[in-house]
Amino acid sequence: MKIFAIDIGNSNTRFAVVEDSKVLNKVQLPSQDSEKIADSLPEIYNKFTIGENLPIVVCSVVENIFRKLCDRAELALDITPAVIGRDIPLPIELDLKDKKTVGTDRVVSAAMAYDRIDGAVAVASFGTAITIDCVNDKGVFLGGAILPGLRISLVSLAENTSALPEVQLESAVECPGRDTKGAMNAGVIFGAVGALREIVERFATKLGRWPELILTGGDANIIRTHCDFADAVVPDLLIMGIELAYEKWKVQADD
C-alpha cells in the first residue's frame, strides 16, 4: 500500500510517502513551530503525491501539532487523516498494566521490527528520550524502559550544576574524557550504551534468549559507533511502521 505518513515527535515532525516498506520521499521540520508545520502540510503533500490521492496516516506524541495538522488537512486538502491509536488499532498485541498510556510511536516501531525479524526483538530509539522496548517470540509487546535522551542529559548537566558548561553532543568521544566537554560526552554516550546493554540483558533473561537489537532515532548512529552488540540501525523504522499499521487495519476492514 502507498500512504502519506506523518510522524509527530517531540523534537521533529516528519512527512513521508511510504510504499511496501520503502520510504520514497521524506522531509523533516522542527516540532517547536507548530504553525509552520501545519502551514507546510498542503505544499509538501502536493509535492510528494504529484496528483495521487493518498491517505494521510498520523502517528503522534504531541497533541497540539497533531490537532493543527488534522485541521489543516481537512481544510486545505479535504482529507481526514487516519490516526494510529484513535482510528487505526495498534498493530501489535500489548501485555501491559496500562495500555492507554503507552506511546504509539514505541508500539509502531516495535511492531515493524517484529514484522521484519519474525522473532523476539528489542527496539532502542535514541531521540529526545531514549526508549528501549521488548517484543517476545509470539509478537507481543511487553513494554520497556524510558531514559533521558543524550542531548537532554547534556542540557540538564549544564542547567543544574554551577560549573559544568553547555556542550554539544559529539560522536567522536573517548573514555576517559580528557577535558570537561569530553567527560560530559563520554558520560552520556557510554552511560547510554551501558544502560542499553543492561536493559537488553534483562529482556534476554525474561525471554530466555538474547533478542535481535534494532537501533533507531536521530542519535542512533552515534550509539552504534560505540556499541558492538546492536544488529542494525533503521532510521525510518517508525515511518515504515505507520504503513504497517495502516495495511493491517485495511486488511482487517476488508475481510
Image (spheres, grey):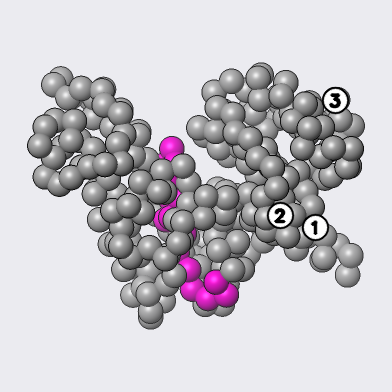
Please, what secondary structure does the residue beneath circle 1 have? loop
The amino acid pointed to by label 3 is Ala
Q: Position of residue 128 (x, y in %)?
A: 43, 37
Residues at marks 2 and 1 touching, judged by CB atoms closer than 8 Å: yes
Label of residue 61 in the image? none
**Is residue 45 located in the magenta-colored stretch of the structure?**
no
Q: Residue 144, located in which quarter of the rendered image? A: bottom left
Label of residue 1 in the image? 1
Q: Position of residue 155 (x, y in %)?
A: 30, 28
Number of numbered markers? 3
Is residue 102 depicted above or below 51 in this figure?
below
Q: Residues within 10 Å of mark 3 (few under 14, many from 20)?
A: few
Q: Position of residue 196 (x, y in %)?
A: 32, 57
Q: Circle 2 is placed at which residue position?
A: 243
Q: Is residue 163 left or right of residue 112?
A: left
Q: Residues within 10 Å of mark 2 (few under 14, many from 20)?
A: many
| Residue at (64, 54) in percent of width and height | 240
Residues at marks 2 and 3 touching, judged by CB atoms closer than 8 Å: no
Is residue 172 depicted above or below 223 in this figure?
above
Q: Earlier in the sequence, mark 2 or mark 3?
A: 3
Is residue 56 depicted above or below 77 in this figure?
below
Nearest the eye: 162 or 112: 112
Q: Quadrant of the N terminus?
A: bottom right
Which SS type dominates the magenta stretch?
Answer: strand
**Is residue 120 located in the magenta-colored stretch of the structure?**
yes
| Residue at (48, 51) in percent of width and height | 216
Which range of residues does the magenta coloring cover?
Answer: 117-132
Please, what secondary structure does the residue beneath circle 3 have? helix
